């Protein structure tokens, strides 16, 4: 691998540009540096106008999700050496409107999450104690709980590319997380939301979302389980 790395970064300023362009930065290869480390270096020492999101630097918040060498990844988690390339192409997540440079508008994405009611719906009387849940029942939703809502899966989904009204894998995976939570009473309520032309049956099981997930989760499995339960439950 070369001693220097060329970064081709998508640049777009809505006040100046009609279309985005790529700008190149050639930097020395640094041991242990992630893509986010290089973005920070460029912004702090070379071009302060470079715009991107980042927060935790621990692959937990999902803020730094972007397309790196044509694959949706977290910049803070992606080691440059692991890419095994002398040229790194960095673009904003596909299918979301670009606000500036690598920052995309996530409002529509979050609206889809909110639409499936991502909270426990409890209709039974409660006392002052917590609702118990067995380890076995928790294991059924354990992976889905780990979703960080970075948007990588929805951005990679062909069904979402052609229909922005589709709830998308992230929202449907979140619906699975609550629908299969034994403490929740909102199954039928959520099935009414996701069982329409823009809901779970819009998923064609292409598995792009699985490949794109930086946390190695399986939204397709969750959506498939929702489809199954739809045929066994009376809505």
Image (cartoon, rainbow, N blue to C red):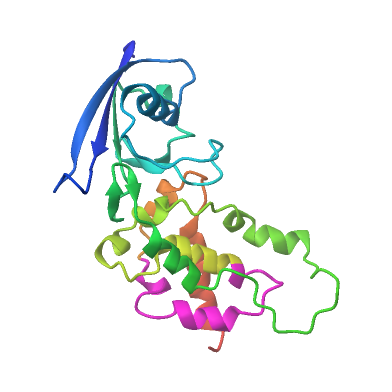
Splitting the image into 4 quarters, where does residue 129 fall?
Answer: bottom right
What is the residue that sits farthest to the bottom in this orientation?
234
Residue 214 x/y as whole percent: 47, 43
Above or below 31: residue 145: below
Residue 162 x/y as whole percent: 25, 64
Residue at 42%, 28% (x, y): give it: 40
Nearer to the camera, 14 or 179: 14
Residue at 20%, 34% (x, y): give it: 22
Residue 187 at least partly seen: yes
Quadrant where the N terminus is found in the figure: top left
- Is residue 41 toward the left or the right of residue 23 in the image? right
Residue 72 at least partly seen: no
Nearer to the camera, 58 or 133: 58
* Residue 14 included in the magenta stretch of the image: no
Q: Which residues are magenta?
A: 178-203
Count of numbered labels shown in the rendering: 0
Residue 229 x/y as whole percent: 54, 77
């Amino acid at each position: 691998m070369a001693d220097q790395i060329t970064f081709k970064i998508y640049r777009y300023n809505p006040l100046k540009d009609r279309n985005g362009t790529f700008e190149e930065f050639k930097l020395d290869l640094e041991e242990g540096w992630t893509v986010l480390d290089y973005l920070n270096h460029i912004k702090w020492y070379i071009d302060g106008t470079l715009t991107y999101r980042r927060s935790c630097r621990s692959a937990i918040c999902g803020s730094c999700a972007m397309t790196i060498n044509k694959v949706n990844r977290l910049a803070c988690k992606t080691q440059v050496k692991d890419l095994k390339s002398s040229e790194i192409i960095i673009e904003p997540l596909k299918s979301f409107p670009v606000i500036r440079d690598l920052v995309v508008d996530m409002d529509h994405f979050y609206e889809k999450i909110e639409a499936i009611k991502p909270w426990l719906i409890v209709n039974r009387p409660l006392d002052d104690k917590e609702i118990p849940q067995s380890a076995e029942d928790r294991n059924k939703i354990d992976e889905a709980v780990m979703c960080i809502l970075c948007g990588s899966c929805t951005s990679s989904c062909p069904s979402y590319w052609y229909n922005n009204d589709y709830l998308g894998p992230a929202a449907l995976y979140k619906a699975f997380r609550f629908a299969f939570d034994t403490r929740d009473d909102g199954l039928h309520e959520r099935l009414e939301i996701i069982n329409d032309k823009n809901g779970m049956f819009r998923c064609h099981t292409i598995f792009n979302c699985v490949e794109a997930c930086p946390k190695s989760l399986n939204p397709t499995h969750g959506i498939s389980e929702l489809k199954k339960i739809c045929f066994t439950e009376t809505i």
